C-alpha cells in the first residue's frame, strides 16, 4: 500500500482554530513587584517569596531556599505551593486522599495521620495544600519568571553538591 492510497479518502472536515501568536513575558518587571499585588494571599512577604522561587528553581531544596529567604521550611513550602510550584506536598496521592477524607469528616484525625504514614508536620502541610489553591496570577508570574530565568544549574554555589554536575553554560552559543 502506497502513501497516496492511504491518503486517498482523507479530507478536512473542520477548520483549525487560529490561536494567535504566542507571547512571552518581556515586561522585565521584577518578580517581587509582580507579587506585591497579591501579598495578602502569600504566607510570607513578596521579597521572601521571590527569594524562595529563585532558590528553589535553581535546584536548591525547600529547606535551603527557606534559609536563604529567612523563613521556616513549612512557610517556604506553603509559599511555593501558592506560587503554583508542584511537588512540595510531602504525601503521596493516596495519602492526600486520606487527608481529603479527614477534611470531609469521613475519617477521624488521629486515624488519618496514622494512615498517611507521615508525621504531624507532613499532615499539616498536606492539609494546607488541600485547603489552599495556588494563586493564579502569582502562578502566572512565577511561570514567566522561571521561563525567562537562567538554565538549570546556573546559580548553584561552589559548595553545592550539584554545582559542577550540570556544568557551565558560559561556553555555549
Image (tube, rainbow, N blue to C red):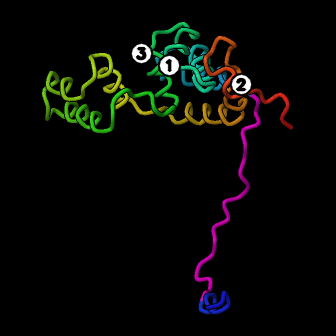
Q: Characterize the local packing of mark 3: few (<14), some (14-19) or many (20 or more) Cα atoms within 10 angstroms.
A: some
Q: Which residues are magenta?
A: 10-28
Q: Secondary structure at mark 1?
A: helix
Measured from the top left, where is residue 2 in percent x and y?
Answer: 65, 90
Disc 2: which residue: 154
| Quadrant of residue 126 within the rendered picture | top left
Q: Are marks 3 and 1 in contact (CB under 8 Å)?
A: no
Disc 1: which residue: 62
Q: Earlier in the sequence, mark 3 or mark 2?
A: 3
Q: Characterize the local packing of mark 1: few (<14), some (14-19) or many (20 or more) Cα atoms within 10 angstroms.
A: many
Which image quadrant: the N terminus? bottom right
| Quadrant of residue 173 within the rendered picture | top right
Disc 3: which residue: 74
Q: Give the overall secondary structure of the magenta segment.
A: loop
Q: Is residue 68 left or right of residue 106?
A: right
| Distance (Cα) linking label 3 and label 2 | 26 Å
Q: Are marks 3 and 2 in contact (CB under 8 Å)?
A: no
| Quadrant of residue 117 within the rendered picture | top left
Q: Which residue occupies the foreground of this view, 151 or 20? A: 151
Q: Residue at x 20, y 35 (%)?
A: 101
Amino acid at each position: 500500500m502506497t502513501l497516496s492510497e492511504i491518503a486517498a479518502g482523507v479530507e478536512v472536515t473542520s477548520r483549525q482554530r487560529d490561536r494567535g501568536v504566542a507571547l512571552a513575558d518581556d515586561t522585565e518587571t521584577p518578580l517581587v513587584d509582580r507579587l506585591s499585588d497579591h501579598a495578602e494571599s502569600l504566607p510570607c512577604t513578596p521579597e521572601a517569596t521571590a527569594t524562595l522561587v529563585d532558590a528553589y528553581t535553581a535546584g536548591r531544596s525547600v529547606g535551603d531556599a527557606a534559609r536563604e529567604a529567612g523563613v521556616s521550611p513549612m512557610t517556604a513550602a506553603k509559599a511555593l505551593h501558592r506560587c503554583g510550584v508542584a511537588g512540595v506536598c510531602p504525601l503521596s496521592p493516596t495519602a492526600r486522599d486520606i487527608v481529603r477524607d479527614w477534611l470531609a469528616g469521613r475519617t477521624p484525625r488521629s486515624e488519618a495521620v496514622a494512615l498517611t504514614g507521615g508525621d504531624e508536620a507532613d499532615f499539616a502541610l498536606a492539609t494546607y495544600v488541600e485547603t489552599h489553591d495556588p494563586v493564579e496570577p502569582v502562578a502566572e508570574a512565577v511561570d514567566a519568571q522561571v521561563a525567562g530565568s537562567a538554565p538549570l544549574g546556573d546559580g548553584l554555589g561552589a559548595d553545592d553538591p550539584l554545582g559542577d554536575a550540570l556544568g557551565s553554560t558560559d561556553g555555549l552559543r
